[in-house]
Image (cartoon, rainbow, N blue to C red):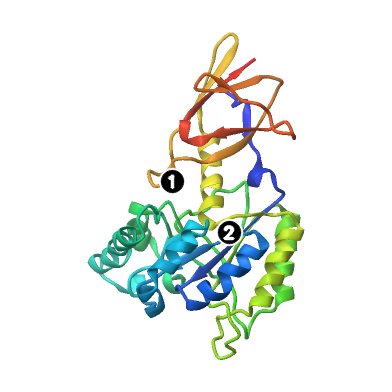
Amino acid sequence: MKNPITVVPWNGHKAAASFTFDDAYESHVTNLAPLLDSLGVKATCFLTGDSYYFNHNIEKFRAMAANGLEMGNHTETHPKLTQLSDADRKREILGYKEYLKKNMPGLPFNVFGTPYCDNNEEVQKIIGQEHYISRDCRGYGRITWEKEPNWLSMDSKAWQRSLNTVEEFCQIARDTNDAGEWIIYMNHGVDLDKNNDYSIDPEDLKAIIQQAIDLDMWIAPFGTVGAYHRASFALQHASVSENEDSYKIRWKFPHAKMPKSIPIRIALDFDGTIEQQDKELSPNEDGSYTIEFGKRELDVLK
């Protein structure tokens, strides 16, 4: 039976952008956090025990998380995971998640970033036990809406001073927006250290983020956009039953570690009324409705 609802791509925006930052640098506290605050943007920081600064300043990253930044798992020692035994992979991935949860209580750490973008099926089997999405790199980092990606090997566009320019990254945002896609940017330090090829000048980063803002892209953490996108495919495959005056739509969580609350914008194929748990929902200004994916069902009244 045809599903009478469709998910509105990228939370009602033409395209989406996520900015991710690896390795828990001091500059994430001193430069990145104030920059994001000034722009009103939230991003994702992937934390690793390989960072001396993080190990001695966990409370500063707790404060960043309290301010809305997403914190992800980036392993205990930042190894090439494909070169380890399964036991060592589990220690690096699953063991370090438990360490992070213990030392940053209240945070789920359900998103992952592979060190060196080093990944294969064996690694993904372990990542997927405790994380619903994982970020790699290798290409242009653009994710299409229509085609379901490999959630445990998401591409991203990595910044290097010697290889990239601000205009190139701004053009990627413009191209992504024109195509109605999601761009995932990968960054490391945010500072003026010209000797670190993976660091980005704060003013350069500001210009790239500002480009996404000017395009009115949906700028949100990696896991936020990823959960919305993954939920959209679950809704496509929802179970639909029809009665004389209504449709009952039910769906399953595609991964146990996804957020319990995922607001999703949907559109109706006809003029009707949407209810969740016997509560009628009011339409948004554009005529769409925001449902709660975590409730796992809704009713469409004809």
Disc 1 marks which residue? 258
Quadrant housing residue 191: bottom right
Q: Nearer the viewer, residue 76 or 58?
A: 58
Q: Do we see residue 297 in this rendering?
A: yes
Q: Residues within 10 Å of mark 2 (few under 14, many from 20)?
A: many
Whole-percent x, y for residue 293 in the image = 51, 35
Disc 2 marks which residue? 42
**82 versus 263 height, above or below:** below
Q: CA distance from mark 2 to mark 1?
A: 19 Å
Q: Residue furthest top?
A: 244
**Secondary structure beneath disc 1?**
loop
Q: Is residue 195 left or right of residue 259?
A: right
Whole-percent x, y for residue 66 in the image = 47, 57
Q: Residues within 10 Å of mark 1 (few under 14, many from 20)?
A: many
Name the residue: 59% across, 55% down: 220
- The label nearer to you, 2 versus 1, is 2
First in sequence: mark 2 vs mark 1: 2
Name the residue: 42% across, 51% down: 132
Q: Residue furthest left?
A: 87
Q: Is residue 197 left or right of residue 99?
A: right
Give the residue type that dot 2 points to.
Lys
Give the residue type that dot 1 points to.
Met
